[in-house]
Image (tube, grey):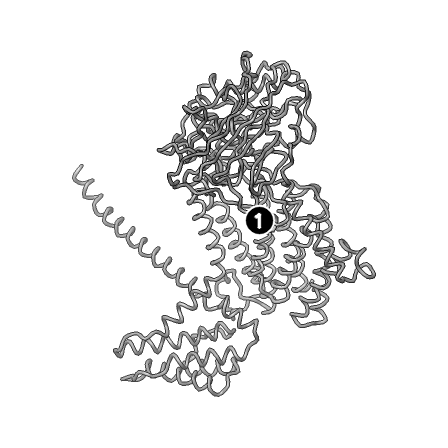
């Protein structure tokens, strides 16, 4: 197999190895076999085009055309003439499929079903990345930059998956990239014929510097070692660095945390970060006021949204479709007619300082009357503002049901529907075994899911020795739940998330609701809800009753009547007209941001996105530390490929600077200008030769660089100035050094093609001097330490005999 063919095979293999990271995102994974076949055909088209041979841009164009034909054959053959020729109908079909795929991605959680739209996105994406890798590594023989599209492919998959086996996909992607680099290195070495041997020569053997026995393997072995060391550093260094932590239940580094555990990087979810800030506000500002015709307000939890997806990284709302607000709302899911319920009406007024795009309401609401642009999310039974609509100053009426099931009805609840149970009992594979073991231990002896739920609630609220503390850092993630169960200290976020997770391990559908507790009664008969009433609680599903509230947080809210001895429920009367909040004091807290993508907003298909709970500061978005850390990491990734360019630009500016005016300074400027010329020639493929005199080196640069008269004369003038500095008794400073250097650079650029100039700019070969400088400094550093250690040892050695003689 020729070097080019071997490189093409390695490029295809590297793309497929990186594409493996997409496998956990979709079920089934049959798309991958299709991607393999199409990618091999695409690579084969490139190999044939290079064998003709065609110009490099034409080779890439041929591969792109073949890829388009293949995608047309697979996804749009009914719209294409002859089943393969792309036309307007084909591109219209692609647009519809991509739009449908985007909607499917926003609707389903991972792993998503393999629809035609998602299949086109996956297969087409792999072909695009494969084309980029093949073009860079094989057609243009630049394997190193080919790692960027591979990194982009892996990053997309890593950002969407739950990270359960992320290390495995990283190893595969990294191994594919190293394989590509090694193949390119072997191909380059093969073009030299025999290469410099790396093995030690036998004593007495005379060598001309070109060894044939095993020498060709030495650079490859070196490359393998470098690759292994780099890969090892990439895996080990992050373990020693602080995680970008800030999720929902991660207490590492926070108050009361022991720092143990681990469990990966956890990202924040807005409502619960804001919730803790709200609970710790020094002043309890009013955000809502309401009047209700319910006789008791103990059950008047104002629910905003539910967090129903726990993927091992965050607790968040599942991405779902929204629709126009129906009137009335449909019946609550799973609620049977024989379960007692009472409809009440509540008139609510939001403060002018409280602005977020989700509407606090009693649950389950049956009808909502509100002005403005509001949409309805049916699974969570929540209202979300559209096109910037917020709760600021809103006044609205909500009819809702007070559902009063009996313990017998809950205990006799049948199995929930299969699709609901699958979705709401899902836990990540990384969830520590302690969570499920503790759930079984706490619920031992329970005869049904209802009794298990009550035992879990009582364990957290009273029997387990837990304490309520709002200063414990909010966080998320499996290891954080494990720490909370061990430390037994936290606030409502910890209690609700832990109980929901434990309920799911028992097979009970569970989610977490976020909102406000009933608030404080006022003298005029209204209720006032403040920042410190922000709360989170678990909701468990029982067929026949529906989503049912539980209260595991000690000293917060009220324990539902159906989890204790029966308590009579109150009657209702006519509601009074609500009085709007008179809170005019400015709030220092930000409103929740609308994070719905603009294109989905226009189409009315926005997904549920968790809101900020209250107007407490810091509640909108991830923590500042996470934003700064992620931004720095992204800048580092983007800056790495530009480091050679930045170093080269800086070196050129220093070398051609003005400097001093003494003869020594003039000599230094002349030598620096000559070094810049030799490095510029090196960047253009003319390697420096230290054995040649400046005059011979100048002639070599003119000949190899095919310089015209102007740049050639500039090179010879610079060489003459260097010889005068090196050999003349009294060297005279030369004028116009910087201008001559620029003439030489322009001449070399004019003699090469556009792609070569791009490579000279982005990947200058003279940047190797940085590696040499670091190596020299490291060697000098080691030498100094060895000398210092030897001196100390000699001093200690001189003292030891003296002390021994004194002791004798």
> Is residue 478 visible in the rendered structure shown here?
yes
Front-lying residue, 749 or 524: 524
Q: Of all residues shown, which one is farthest toward the right?
A: 82
Residue visible at 64% across and 34% down in the picture: 327
Name the foreground residue: 352 vs 411.
Answer: 352
Q: Is residue 37 left or right of residue 425?
A: right
For mark 1, what is the residue? 597
* Residue sticking out furthest to the left: 806
Regarding mark 1 in the picture, which secondary structure is present there? Answer: loop
Mark 1 Cα within 10 Å, few/some/many (few <14, many 20+)?
few
Q: Is residue 746 above or below residue 616?
A: below
The x and y percentages for residue 33 are: 72, 49
Looking at the picture, does residue 117 appear above or below residue 516?
below
The quadrant where residue 467 appears: top left
Q: Seen in the image, is 287 located left or right of residue 76?
A: left
Identified at 61% across, 48% down, the residue is 600
Report x, y in % for residue 692.
43, 79
**Can you say which quadrant of the picture contains the C terminus?**
top left
**Residue 434 in sight from this viewpoint:** no
Spot occupied by residue 163 in the image (x, y as percentages of width and height): 56, 41
Q: Position of residue 676 (x, y in %)?
A: 41, 74
Residue sitting farthest toward the bottom? 709
Of the 4 image quadrants, the one containing the N terminus is bottom right
- Asked whether 516 or 68 is in front, the reply is 516
Residue 536 lies, with reference to residue 713, above or below; the image says above
């Amino acid at each position: 197999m020729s070097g080019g063919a071997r490189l093409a095979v390695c490029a295809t293999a590297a793309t497929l190895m990186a594409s493996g990271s997409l496998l956990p995102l979709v079920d089934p994974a049959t798309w991958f076999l299709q991607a393999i076949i199409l990618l091999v055909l695409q690579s084969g088209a490139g190999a044939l085009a290079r064998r003709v041979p065609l110009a490099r841009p034409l080779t890439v164009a041929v591969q792109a055309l073949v890829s388009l034909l293949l995608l047309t054959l697979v996804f749009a053959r009914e719209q294409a003439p002859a089943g393969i020729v792309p036309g307007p109908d084909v591109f219209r079909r692609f647009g519809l499929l991509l739009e449908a795929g985007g909607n499917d991605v926003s609707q389903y959680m991972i792993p998503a079903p393999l629809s035609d739209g998602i299949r086109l996105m996956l297969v087409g994406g792999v072909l695009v990345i494969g084309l980029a890798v093949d073009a860079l590594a094989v057609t243009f023989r630049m394997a190193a930059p080919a790692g960027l599209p591979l990194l982009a492919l892996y990053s997309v998959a890593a950002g969407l998956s739950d990270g359960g086996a992320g290390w495995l996909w990283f190893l595969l992607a990294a191994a594919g990239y190293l394989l590509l680099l090694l193949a390119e290195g072997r191909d380059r070495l093969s073009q030299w014929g025999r290469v410099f041997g790396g093995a030690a020569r036998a004593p007495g053997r005379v060598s001309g510097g070109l060894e044939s026995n095993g020498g060709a393997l030495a650079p490859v072995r070196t490359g393998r070692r470098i690759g292994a060391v780099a890969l090892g550093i990439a895996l080990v260094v992050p373990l020693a660095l602080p995680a970008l932590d800030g999720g929902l239940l991660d207490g590492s580094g926070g108050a009361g945390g022991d720092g143990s555990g681990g469990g990966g990087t956890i990202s924040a979810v807005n409502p619960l970060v804001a919730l803790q800030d709200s609970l710790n506000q020094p002043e309890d500002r009013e955000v809502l006021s309401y009047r209700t015709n319910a006789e008791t307000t103990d059950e008047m939890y104002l629910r905003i949204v539910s967090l129903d997806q726990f993927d091992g990284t965050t607790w968040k709302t599942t991405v779902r479709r929204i629709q126009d607000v129906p009137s009335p709302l449909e019946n609550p899911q799973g609620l049977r007619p024989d379960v007692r319920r009472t409809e009440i009406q509540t008139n609510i007024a939001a403060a002018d300082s409280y602005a977020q795009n989700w509407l606090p309401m009693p649950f389950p609401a049956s009808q909502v009357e509100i002005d403005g642009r509001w949409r309805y999310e049916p699974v969570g039974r929540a209202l979300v503002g559209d096109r910037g609509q917020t709760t600021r100053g809103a006044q609205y009426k909500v009819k809702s049901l007070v559902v009063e099931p009996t313990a017998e009805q809950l205990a006799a609840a049948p199995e929930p529907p299969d699709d609901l149970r699958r979705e709401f009992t899902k836990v990540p594979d990384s969830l520590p075994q302690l969570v499920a073991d503790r759930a079984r231990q706490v619920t031992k002896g329970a005869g049904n899911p209802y009794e298990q739920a009550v035992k879990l609630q009582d364990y957290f609220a009273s029997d387990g020795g837990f304490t309520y503390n709002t200063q414990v850092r909010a966080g998320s993630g499996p290891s954080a739940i494990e720490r909370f169960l061990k430390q037994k200290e936290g606030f409502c976020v910890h209690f609700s998330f832990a109980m929901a997770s434990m309920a799911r391990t028992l097979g009970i559908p569970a989610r977490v609701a976020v909102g406000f507790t009933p608030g404080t009664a006022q003298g005029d008969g209204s209720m006032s809800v403040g920042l410190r009433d922000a709360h989170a609680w678990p909701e468990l599903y029982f067929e026949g009753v529906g989503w049912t509230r539980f209260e595991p947080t000690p000293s917060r809210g009220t324990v539902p009547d159906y989890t204790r001895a029966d308590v009579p429920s109150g009657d209702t009367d006519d509601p009074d007209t609500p009085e709007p909040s008179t809170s005019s004091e400015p709030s220092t807290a930000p409103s929740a941001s609308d994070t719905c993508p603009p294109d989905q907003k226009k189409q009315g298909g926005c997904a549920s996105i968790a809101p900020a709970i209250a107007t407490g500061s810091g509640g909108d978005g991830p923590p500042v530390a996470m934003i700064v850390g992620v931004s720095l990491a992204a800048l580092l990734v983007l800056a790495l490929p530009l480091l050679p360019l930045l170093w080269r630009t800086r070196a050129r500016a220093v070398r051609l600077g003005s400097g001093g005016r003494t003869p020594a300074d003039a000599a230094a400027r002349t030598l620096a200008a000559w070094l810049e010329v030799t490095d510029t020639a090196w960047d253009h493929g003319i390697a420096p030769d230290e054995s040649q005199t400046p005059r011979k080196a100048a002639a070599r640069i003119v000949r190899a660089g095919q310089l015209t008269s102007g740049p050639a004369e500039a090179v010879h003038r610079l060489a003459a100035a260097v010889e005068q500095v090196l050999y003349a008794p009294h060297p005279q400073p030369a004028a116009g050094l910087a201008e001559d250097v620029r003439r030489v650079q322009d001449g070399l650029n004019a003699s090469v093609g556009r792609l070569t100039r791009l490579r000279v700019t982005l990947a200058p070969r003279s940047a190797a001097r940085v590696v040499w400088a670091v190596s020299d400094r490291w060697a000098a550093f080691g030498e100094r330490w060895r000398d210092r250690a030897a001196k100390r040892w000699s001093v200690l050695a001189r003292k030891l005999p003296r002390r021994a003689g004194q002791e004798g």
